[in-house]
Structure formats: structure tokens, C-alpha cells
Image (cartoon, rainbow, N blue to C red):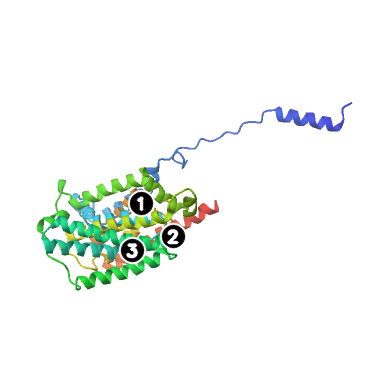
Amino acid sequence: MSSPESVRREGAAKASSTPSPARSAKPVSWLGDPDRRPGWLTDLSMLPALVVVVGVLSVLTDGMLTPSNIVNVGSQSAVVAIAAIGATFVILTGGIDLSTGSVIGASGVSAAWMITSTGSVAAGVAAGLLTGTVIGLVVGTVVAKMPVVPFAVTLAALYVVNGATTLLSHGKTIAPVPAGFIEFSIDGPGGVPYSVWLAVVLYAVAQTILTRTAWGRRVLHVGANAEVARISGVHVARTKASVYAVAGLFSAIAGIVLTSGLAGAGAGMGGPLLLNIVGAVVLGGTSLFGGRGSLLRTAVGVLFLGFLSNGMSLLGLASFDQQIVTGAVIFIAASADGLGRWLRRRA
């Protein structure tokens, strides 16, 4: 006669050998699976919102989607678009650069002063690029080497650079610049200004650098987790300093393009653009906490703000009304970024 213990063992063995009914696993589409979804599709997640905004504004206004107005939006957005490339690299590391507007002014003034002094556009462009890059490198070195937050450093740099530029230019607009230099922001192939074509090329190059180079991967790693990046062999301080230098370079390019469009340069000309530059990065979906984003997202954010501003102008809204709407939209985007981060932590 079998003991109760042997019976239980035999029953357990039979139960384990009996195949359990297979659960019907519902296949997950590639759209719902983050591992299978193409990265570029995630980067364009704000595109439907852009389409909706453009669609609504085209109904409410006349001429929104005419070729001339589309070119106008691109031309007006070119400076913000170029400066936002550098801001994207900074924000991807978890930093922030409030000195962008003052660097745009300083680079533009340097370029205009050199052009008017020597008559050489090439010398002016070189002077502007050097000015912006050096300022960015100095700011980045302080951010990377000293125990201070980027907000404080770049805010101080905003005042110092703007004050120094005003002092050196005697508070005056540096003009005139050659007609050929001005035409850069007016004429171009297919009726599209060269400044717009330049922005498109720079975005393609910057996106390739971010996604296909070791430096781009280091930028993302530092933003995702600086300590893990350091343990993995990434020189965190050097990477942080480099992104501010790159931001200074792109701010300098934006300043030179803005000088071309305004036919001159003044110290404060880049200040009003700071909100749109940072806002375009945030609206596109690049996280303010770093480690997540791309230049494609920023491009969508630039177009969103460009068409929104253009549509409000066509509707006849006053400038302060436009500022309220733009600020509210950026606030919602930043809040959504923070909420999304909180939900991911909870999950």
C-alpha cells in the first residue's frame, strides 16, 4: 500500500508532465513595440500636432498654405532653427544655455564690424564664428569644471556677453553691410533663400553626427546618466564642455544669418529669440532632463512655432497676445515632458 507522501509525489509528477493549455498571445504590432518601432517615427511624434495646427490655421486665415507664405515661414524660422541645433545638443546632456541670445548678438556684431572695417565678407564670417565658439567654449568649461548649475552660469554669461557687446559697439547698430551679403537671406535656388537651405543642410549634418558618431553617442549617454557614462569610460567634463562650444558655433551661424537678414547687427538682436529657440527644442519632444531627443524632433518644433506665429500674425493678434499663446504652448510641452518622466519612473 502506498504511503500518502508517495501518492502526493506521484500526483505532482503527473501534474508537471501534463502540458498546460497555451495562452493565446496577441501579437503586438511594430507600432506598439518600442523595440521594433523605427527611431525616426518616434522622433516625428509631434508631426500630427503640427499638421493639426497648420490645418486649423489654414481654415481660419487666408493664404496660410500658399507657396510664398510657406517660404516666408521658412525664412523667418531659419535663425531660430540654426540656433536650436546647438541648444538641442546642450539639452541632450541635461544642461541649459540661456546665453544663446547674447551669443547671437555678439557674433553678429563681430561679423558686421569686421565686414564694415575690411570690406571682406569672409573675414566677417570667420570673426563671427570664432566669437561664438570661444564664448561657448568658455561657458562650457565653467559648467563642466565647476560645481555650479548650468542655469546660473549661462544666465551670468547672458548679462556679461550682452553688456560687453553693447560696450564695444557703443550701443549702436553696425551697418551697412554689402548687398551681396544681404541677399543671402532673400534670394536662393527655387525662390527659397540660401538661409533656409543652409538650415536644412545643417540639420542633416547635425542629425548624422548625433546618431552616427561616437561623440553623439557620448552626448546621449551623459544626458541619460552621467555617472554611468563616467564608469563606462566617457570623459563627462570634456563632453559637456564640447556641447556648449558647439552651441556657441551654431549661435554664431544664426547671428551671421540674422545680420544678413537685418542688414546690420546690434547687441540685443538675439535676446527676443531665446524663448523660441528653447521652446522649439522642448516642443519637439527633446527631454529637458537629457538623454532623449533628436534634431528631427527639434525641426518639427521649429516648424510648429513658425507656423503658429505666422498664423497668429495673419489673424491680426497683437504681439503680447502671441507671446501669451507661445508661452502657454511651451509650458504645456514642458509639463508633458515632466509628467511623462514621472510616469516612466512609476512604471
Q: Residues within 10 Å of mark 1 (few under 14, many from 20)?
A: some
* Disc marking residue 49: 1
Neighbour tally class for label 3: few under 14, some 14-19, many 20 plus, Cα within 10 Å = some
Residue extending farthest to the right is: 1
Q: Amino acid at mark 3?
A: Val
Q: Which residue is mark 2?
A: 335
The quarter of the picture where residue 12 lies is top right
The answer for how far apart the CA atoms under marks 1 and 2 are is 16 Å
* Residue 310 in view, yes or no: no
Question: Disc 2 on helix, strand or loop?
Answer: helix
At 37% across and 48% down in the image, what residue appears?
Answer: 215
Q: Position of residue 196 (x, y in %)?
A: 22, 51
Residue 318 in the image: x percent, y percent? 26, 67
In terms of sequence position, does the residue under pointer 1 or pointer 3 come before the other?
1
Q: Which residue is mark 3?
A: 325
**Marks 2 and 3, how far apart in space?**
15 Å
Q: Nearer the viewer, residue 285 or 148?
A: 148
| Secondary-structure class at tag 1 | helix
Occupied quadrant, residue 96: bottom left
Task: Report the Cα–Cα distance between label 1 and label 3.
Answer: 16 Å
Identified by mark 2, the residue type is Ser
| Res. 35 visible in picture | yes
Task: Indicate the position of residue 325 as horizontal and vertical percent values.
Answer: 33, 63
Q: Earlier in the sequence, mark 1 or mark 2?
A: 1
For discs 2 and 3, the disc positioned in front in the rendered view: 2
Q: Nearer the viewer, residue 311 or 79?
A: 79
Residue at 73% from the left image edge and 30% from the top image edge: 15
Residue 122 placement: quadrant: bottom left
Q: Nearer the viewer, residue 183 or 131?
A: 131
